[in-house]
Amino acid sequence: MSQVKDIFDAVKHKLPDRDNLYPAINTALRLISKRLFYNRSNLVRGELDETITADSSSLTLPTDFWGLIGAPYIEDDLSVLKPIPNEEEKLSNTENTNPVFYEIIGQTCYLYPGSSSAETLKGGYWTRPTKITSPLDTMPFAELFDDVIEDALLEVYGEKNMGLRQFIYQAVDEIAPYIGRTAVTEVQDAQCLDSLYEEEW
């Protein structure tokens, strides 16, 4: 796995007056992640495995959570949660039993009703790239886009003329379709769940 210093070493001879390349690297990583999500790539997929404590109506999502892929569900219960449809449902689901609906606000997932017993929330989610802050940080994506990020630095700080967003999108699109696209986590079809994942992410 490459580190940030490897990216610096590759371009520093072309950008001798630049000491802080982190803002451009992080911008490039965010654009790459968004384009990978557009391409439904497994490279930006994470898996929820979050504990719902007994008598609780909310839980904190992973720090890299950037959006759901499909619907979350309760492990072992084969109970897929639905988005809360309106305020009336919120007000009528206040007693902790078995969660039916969910609502995500920021990094918190609220359950309606709350869970009366300890459970595990599962499902797929879109991951946010970890912010790069140190030369020893590991570059994401298994070196697939290191050259793209190097060229992005030259685009931002050098003399290239291609638009950064278009440049990154084109570079990602040349790779992403061949890596494998993500599929929603399968749930055992014990309750006629065939239609649960019809909505594409």
Image: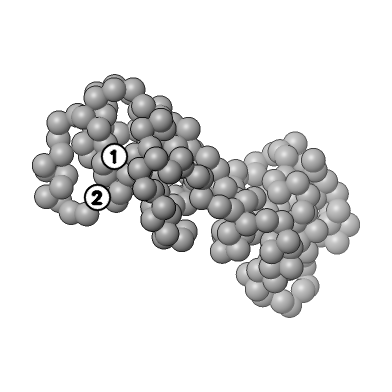
- Whole-percent x, y for residue 114 in the image: 24, 32
| Horizontal side, residue 126 vs residue 79: left or right | right
* Along the line of sight, the residue nearer the viewer: 150 or 125: 125
Res. 106 visible in picture: no
Residue at 39%, 40% in the rendered image: 190
Give the quadrant of residue 28: bottom right
| Horizontal side, residue 24 vs residue 45: left or right | right
| Horizontal side, residue 121 vs residue 58: left or right | right
- Kind of residue at badge 1: Tyr
Indicate which disc residue 23 carries.
none
Residue at 47%, 51% in the rendered image: 69
- Whole-percent x, y for residue 46 in the image: 55, 43
* Along the line of sight, the residue nearer the viewer: 50 or 122: 122
- Mark positioned earlier in the residue sequence (2 or 1): 2
Residue at 15%, 31% in the rendered image: 95
Q: What SS does tag 2 mark?
A: loop
- Whole-percent x, y for residue 156 in the image: 70, 66
The residue where tag 2 is placed is 84
In the depicted structure, whether residue 60 falls above or below residue 25: above
For the residues marked 2 and 1, what is the alpha-carbon distance in whole angstroms? 9 Å
The residue where tag 1 is placed is 110
Circles 2 and 1, Cβ within 8 Å, touching? The answer is yes
* Quarter of the rendering occupied by the N terminus: top right
Label 2 neighbour load within 10 Å: few <14, some 14-19, many 20+: some
